[in-house]
Amino acid sequence: MLDIARVIRRSNNDRFDTVFFFDKTNEDVIETQRRIPGSIGFPDDFVDLVLREDPEEDAPLDSNAPLNPPEEGEDTHEVRTAQLQTSLRRDFKRAFPFDVLNLDLEQFFLVPGDEFPGRMFRALRKLFEWQRRALPGAQRKTVDGFSLMFTTQIGPPNLTEEYLNMLRDRLTENLARDADLLPLFQTRTGLADVRLLQETQFEMFFKLGVPKVLASILKEEDWYVDATQGIRTYEFERPRQGGSYKMLHFVMDVVRQKPPYDRRDLRAPTADAEAAYQEVVRQFITEPEIVVTLETIDQDSLQRSLELIKARRRKYCPECPEG
């Protein structure tokens, strides 16, 4: 699909070797690679890999070097497994920065059982830090921006007080900083109190709170959401046994703060970043999400896209079954 939309392109060797993805097992990775020739897959949990401890993370890395057991460790299956996990993480980190990040969570963004502020929250911080890495090459250039897509399930409703406070405080802070936001907030929600919104309209509270958190993490890591398009929010349902559950898909263009923080006298966000942040907050408070259903989809256009996708799949993987 991204190939058809020209979001990704084959490299000079006619392969998609700039595409990286995660899957559950080696077999799943191999199957995806059959459909996306040259892509690089990781049979691992995304959050586990990103948060995996690596004491030598900042040391020069050579992923082609053999995996030797630590000097003080035994040459056992457990040691080899740990080394393989470390190698996977280093390989993934070396691939940064990316032009497009598409994070489709199978779990909740905020998990009540996680230690605050949450494993996914911490993984995003690490991810946006790695996006500041220099591109390969002698000039050590960095990227000025990237596109971010983030998909998560709405909920859960039993969030701990720490998580609820985080969402409430960030929304309340924005309303306090910009007096013009409160009437817009009231028009959107019918309420003037963030806590009451959380207690009576949890879905709306979540829809407004999560993009605020995403924008805040980006700003803390020396990025900001481009206010030209802001954060576009799409809502859709995924089926499950006995019913369905609601998902939110956030799309945004992200820009590096200039000058970067290591060339500023203070780590505080730039004036441009703060102005864009306030405008983005105003946008997602006033602009409702786009609800995607079978009724709202252009069926003819969808069918044409599906046929193009199937044709491209047959081209790259003629032996793969249709479906």
Image: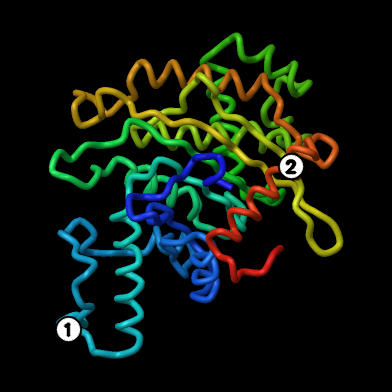
Please indicate whether residue 163 sits to the left or right of residue 97 in the image: right
Check disc 1 and give the amino acid type.
Glu
Q: Residue at x 62, y 25 (%)?
A: 284
Q: Is residue 171 above or below residue 306?
A: above
Badge 1 is on which residue? 72
Badge 2 element:
helix
Judged left or right of residue 3, residue 124 is left
Crowd class of label 1 (few under 14; some 14 to 19; many from 20; radius 10 Å): few
Q: Position of residue 198 (x, y in %)?
A: 71, 35
Marked residue nearer the N-terminal end (1 or 2): 1
Q: Label for residue 163?
A: none
Direction top: furthest residue: 180
Badge 2 amino acid? Leu
* Secondary-structure class at tag 1: loop
Residue ID at (58%, 10%): 179
Q: Where residue 104 appears, x then y in whole percent?
A: 57, 51
Residue at (68% x, 14% y) in the render: 184
Check the picture and name the quadrant holding the C terminus: bottom right
Q: Is residue 240 left or right of residue 247?
A: right
Which residue has dot 2 on it? Answer: 302
Q: Where residue 109 sits in the image (x, y, percent)? A: 58, 50
- State which quadrant residue 321 falls in: bottom right
